[in-house]
Image (spheres, grey):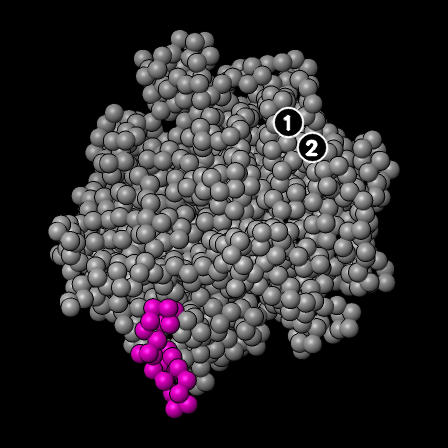
Amino acid sequence: MTNHWVDLKNADVFMICGANPSENHPCSWKWLEKAREERGAKIIVVDPRFTRSAARADLFSFLRPGTDIAFFNALIKYAIDNNYINWEYVQNYTNAPILVNPDFKGPWELDGYFSGYDKEKKKYDTKTWNYQTDPATGEPIRVQLIPIAEDPTFHGRGVPIGPKDANGNYIPVEWDLIKAGRYDEMQPTVFAKLAKHVSRYTYDGPDSVVAKVCGMDPEKFKEIAETYVGITHKREKTGNLMYAMGLTQSTYGTEKIRAFAILQALLGNTGLPGGGINALRGESNVQGSTDFGLLSHILPGYISVPNTTDHPTLDKYLEKSTPKAGIWTWLPRFFKSYLMAYYGPYAKKNGLDKAYDLHPKVKKGKNYTHIALFEDMYAGIIKGLIAWGQNPVVGGACSNLEAAAMDKLDWFVAADLWETESMNFWRRPGVEPKDIKTEVWVLPAASSVEKSGAVTNSGRLAQYRWKAVEPPGEAKSDAWIMHQLMKALKDLYEAEGGKNKEAITELFWAYEEDEHGDPNLDQVQLEMSGFTWPEGDFSWEAAFKKPVFGFANLKDDGSTVSGTWIYCGQWASDADIESAAKILKIDGQLPKGDDGKVKIPRDKQVTEWNGIPFNKAQWHFQKTNVYWLGSDGQTIYTENPPPDAKLIDLGISPNWAWAWPVNRRIIYNRNSVDWSGKPFAPDKALFTFKDDETLGMKIDVPDFYTQPSSDPAFPEELRGKATMRTRSGATSFFMNREPGALVARLFSNSMVDGPFPEHYEPRESPVKNMLSSVQNNPAAVLEWPSAKNEPEKWGFAEVGDKRFPYVCTTYRVTEHWQAGQMTRNNSWLGEAMPENFVEISKELADELGIKNGDLVEVESLRGKVQGVAVVTVRLKPLEIGDNGTARKIHIVGLTWHYGYIGLFTGGPERNGMSKKNYAANQLTPHVGDANTTIPESKAFLVNLRKVK
Amino acid sequence: MELSRRSFLKLSGAGIGVAALAQLGFTTPAYAADVELRIREAKESTTVCPYCSMGCSAIVSVQDGKIVGLEGLPDSPINRASLCSKGQSIIQVANNERRLKKVLYRAPGATDWEEKTWEEAIPAIARLIKDTRDATFVETEEITTKDATGNDVKTEVTANRCEGIAQLGGAALDNEECYLASKFARALGLVYIEHQARI
């Protein structure tokens, strides 16, 4: 999430697409209701099903699964057509005013492709997806989309001076051309290209794209667009996108999110309270596990993995990976501090270059993600698998294939709380255990209340939780298991040698153990956060005395350690400890030095002083930054408010736990104030500028350069030309990497499948693509080896396949969680939602003679699954276009939580194994997104029949 | 005056919650005016829900080493004491007969589990990892780059990756464990490192 859970209360309009928070993030809903009560916020839900969230929404529309880009692009078109644009934001904080390379061509010219497509390699060459640059400065050329008083240093930026239309919006310079749809005659800016691109995504009448492609009622579309776009483009209003796997599980999932990010930028919604792009993550620590690099393409802190071709040495890695602008110019600090965390003592002796050599490098261009991993397992390349609490036989796409891949393993080690389908894959329904030669080890693990540690929620907030009880029987924490295994491996490699032996024997793994063999997790946390490497021999005592507070203090000379730079500073600073102690009224007991000042020694005893480990900054008290807004709706008071001023509490609780990065709660927050430094929304102000060089009020941690021009860190070349205000405004998205364009990108060259989002059909679709002759995302891998070699088992239905006439989508229910092991073994939740069910519309039920409660079987080309029929009005057939004619498409929905083992398996059996497998992922295809390879589990084709 | 937890709460206002007091060392049992609290003998600590990603906090009450109560934490700015049906049932995760309590082993081709000890499991698994790692390890590989004149140049460079072992999981672990899992896997040279975020 760019924002956070409590911040939902600050939104004016919600757009919920591909998520169902009322069902799957139930406690979030109170913050939407609060926004409704206090701000009159509107809630819009667009979904293939009328969900529990839809039931509480102000506006709802059905949408055919997989057509979100068509819908979002139509919203963008609606914003452009009606001049519902926050021009002040767009002109200054986005790349909309930048001129595009004249060689760039879009799908409107190339029938569904962007320029640079190689039909043989099925890949894009992205070299035309860039800007026109000024030969003198090398920076992109920005023009005025609206008349502004231009800043002499930062061209194309400044305060708007032009006339406004009847709605109070600035009139763009080329409004006549925009109004007439003559985008080709405009200056070739990103904005003009975008306008041209989305002009194909029509929304008027029954022949429009929203009607024919999405199956939406065009009148309903307009109502939704007028509410979301019409309200939230206003500078003082914010719209909030909430999404989840309903958008991402798609062969063009990343582009769906981009489409909405583009809309949010045009409306000026990102960086403000109540706005942003908010991914509702599914698991308690899926944010943390991503942050710590448990993915094949990133190391901890989103550092890209090195490959052999580009990065054979440390110098090459840093040379090729460090950009020329933005926060990632600090990559050498982050990466060297990471290497020190892994190989500190070895690097001190042999240098960081040698430490880098020990680190694995991938093969350039090879895909190692979940789908590829199981394909390679099926091909016999992967021999051993270790799983920490993951159950792919239920949760993985095309799960029968993934289970069959596991048959080929030599060994499988699974740590979990329960017996799962995956650890019992060798006796799943339909196989003979004696045929499966895999050796399996099952390790009993501790649950969240049986160990101490932090978890990071969807709002990037790391919260600590405490061990309450011992784990049952011989169960151990995962940390214990990893620690003991690493010790045993170190011993083995010391004794016997082996391949790249030093990577293991020299690994910095010096955590002290308690009497049970558990590693000291305070030491792990300090290493994750950061410290200055002590002089002389390493000791934890010395390390604890020198924590590094914040990634800006990391060094690129190997003198600092930080295992995960974005968490640098999580280990609380002295100031944090002092202020918390004051509020807890225990500051009188803090030890003082000779000078009378508080000294906070960093040894274990003191960090755990009085029962509160200071590092675990979760100070059980409420204190939030507040201010007051005068009755004129504009004047901001931070103290001594007049009696008629209103108290504003934006719900930022900086002293509750710690959010990465640097305890910032809303990222990109420079964009909450305009170029002149005034908050866009006075009742949602995060900052004010006292003058051009100083901030006034600070409600959140600034996400921008705050050095005044007199500061030594201020860039030399800008001295005398820029101020803190103008420099921070011109680089308001400084996580980006392009010099002169540290702004929101409506046009991007970092996607593999296009600089703008284009609609394609899901891999399995009932109809041909109505926008171009390109049926599927041309940059996605559309056929992995399993489907190519055994199309009859793992392949795909054809377009409009008569054998599989219905569109199927999968989802979750509030009573269960993910692959089910955490809820299907629990009697309260199991009884509340005991068996697998299949939702079908009344119309389809009538056609097939199915009644509520009948047992039905859903079948795709790849598998079959049974469930109880739920005949409902929550689904309805959608009228969509097909070769110029209208066609009715039925949607079928089922949950994916069930399997074949547990107290509740998904069928009628209880407390053991089922003879049938109730995992819905048996149906889903083994194909994924072009950028991320997230499987396409939300739109595929099935047939349905009554069993009894 | 005996400073009971309840009167302390009154004295300190709403600022500090019960869980903090437990951690501050206030072990005095709480007394309501005339009703004995169900958890009067229990020791409290706080936890964060293991289900969805909201990060709702709860108070866990423990008596004689067993969880006897679990309720939403009013102090949390996120959930302000509310919990959903899953959050309320965390107690059934801890107090559950179906939990794995022993190391289990399935030999190749076997039809059932055998119970094992950690003393057997750790060295046996370390051996499996080492043997597979060493057998499938790619120490170096040849790469092709262009020289100044545009000709292909082949060079042998270190790869130091293990292609024969994959690691899954992490979204249900704590941050410290995720960090260790990442370090563990990359020290082994693993490149097939994936978890629930991808699916």
Report the residue at 69% width, 45% height from top.
A86
Q: Is A469 in front, or is A497?
A: A469
Name the residue beneath numbered marker 2.
A78
Amino acid at pointer 1: Lys
Crowd tier of the residue under label 1, counting other residues whose Cα lies within 10 Å: few below 14, some 14–19, many 20 or above = some
- Chain letter belonging to callout 2: A
Assign the magenta stretch its main secondary structure. loop
Task: Kindly identify the residue that appears in the image at 67 percent across and 78 percent down.
Answer: A712
Closer to us: A934 or A488: A934
Tell me residue A493's x, y (percent): 37, 67
Q: Magenta residues? A: A580-604
In percent of width and height, residue B171 lies at 40, 50
The disc label shown at residue A222, or none: 1
Q: CA distance from mark 1 to mark 2?
A: 8 Å
Examine the rendering and report whether any part of residue A377 can be seen: no
Residue A270 in sight here: yes
Q: Amino acid at mark 2?
A: Tyr
In magenta segment, residue A586 = yes
Q: Residue A524: where, in percent of width, then height?
A: 38, 67
The front one of A163 and A892 is: A163
In the rendered image, the vertical position of residue A817 relative to residue A942, given as above or below: below
- x 41%, y 27%: residue: A894
User: Dots 1 and 2: beta carbons under 8 Å?
Assistant: yes
Q: Earlier in the sequence, mark 1 or mark 2?
A: 2
Instruction: Say above or below: A560 vs B7.
Output: below
- A314 lies above or below A746: below
Residue at 57% across, 63% down? A697
